Amino acid sequence: MSREIAVVLVVLALGVFGRNTVIAASALVTLVLMLPPFRALLPLASDYGIRAGLTMLMIAVLAELALGRVPIGDLTKQIWSIDGLFAVVGGLVASWMSARGVTLLAQRPQVTIGLVVGSIMAASFLGGVPTGPIFAAGLAALLLGLWQMFFG
């Protein structure tokens, strides 16, 4: 058994053990994609998976609006409320951090292992949801930058 398969099997086991269906399902799909008939799809998943995942997340959020589950009302009033202002700031910070995450992943793909381990730990033991690997990479980039500024 290759190291790659062993690592994905460990991720699958942790997802099952931690009762996190997102992690378990992701590992299971990855194992299927590692099978010879589907192996050609792995580069596509690697190259386009993040963009496709982010697109699906955005569709899910917009679907709530489209279904009328989020009251639209007076948009200006909602955006300028305390909740709205904090949401706008949250969106700005998350997008800014995520851009740094994409850069970090491109420059240092080895951080992926740490992101996966951290996501699994948080999802399995802290009730976290592993939906933000790009944001997590952005936070890692910020922490690395601070480390280098003070100690490097």
Image: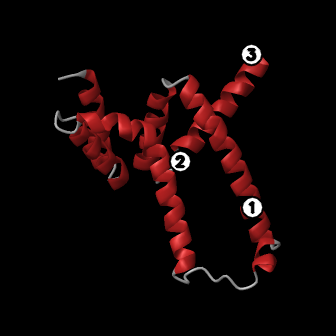
Q: Which residue matches tag 2?
A: 132
Closer to the eye: label 3 or 2: 2
Colour setting:
secondary structure
x%, y% of residue 131? Answer: 49, 51
Q: Which residue matches tag 3?
A: 151
Residue 61 placement: quadrant: bottom right
Q: In 3D space, how far apart are the residues under numbered discs 3 and 2 (Cα atoms)?
A: 28 Å
Type of amino acid under label 3: Phe
Q: How many marks?
A: 3
Type of amino acid under label 1: Val
Type of amino acid under label 2: Gly
How packed mark 3 is, by other alpha carbons closer than 10 Å (few <14, some 14-19, many 20 or more), is: few
Q: Residue at x 40, y 47 (%)?
A: 124
Q: Which mark is residue 123?
A: none
Q: Residue at x 75, y 69 (%)?
A: 84
Identify the mark nearer the N-term, 2 or 1.
Answer: 1
Q: Which residue matches tag 1?
A: 88
x%, y% of residue 120? Answer: 41, 42
x%, y% of residue 85? Answer: 79, 65
